[in-house]
Image (cartoon, rainbow, N blue to C red):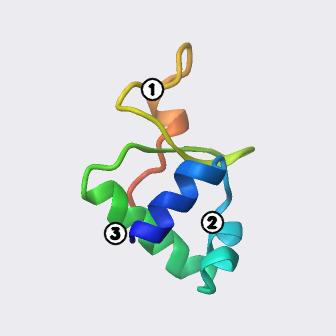
Amino acid sequence: MDKALDYIKSKGPIFAKQLGNSLSVSEKQARNLIDKLRASGEPIWFDANRGFWWLDDMAPSGVPYKQWRRTKVG
């Protein structure tokens, strides 16, 4: 999980498929890593047009929270 977080912090916004490719895992496994990071409290945000990125606990200004944070699955 640490590698995934470091990659998101340094390369984000990034799509799950790109993250998976960089970590040599499937897109589904990359999404699972993102979900685990979020469940552990990491503020990973999502925009359907740009991908995932890490940012402090504040939502990007002027943007509704639900549009940016990926809905937790399962």
User: Of the residues shown, which amino acid type is indicated by label 2?
Assistant: Ala
In the rendered structure, find residue 67 and report the number of the disc placed on it. none
Most extreme residue toward the left, as rendered?
A: 40
Marks 2 and 3, how far apart at CA: 17 Å
Residue visible at 45% across and 29% down?
Answer: 65
Q: Position of residue 49 (x, y in %)?
A: 74, 44
Residue visible at 63% across and 86% down?
Answer: 24
Marks 3 and 1, how far apart at CA: 23 Å
Q: Position of residue 68 (x, y in %)?
A: 53, 37
Residue that mark 1 sits on: 59
Depth check, mark 2 against mark 3: the one in front is: 2
Residue that mark 2 sits on: 16
Q: Quadrant of residue 56?
A: top left
Residue visible at 54% across and 74% down?
Answer: 30
Tell me: residue 74, above or below residue 62: below
Count of marks placed on residues: 3
Q: Is residue 41 left or right of residue 19?
A: left
Tell me: residue 66, above or below residue 63: below
For the N terminus, the quadrant is: bottom left
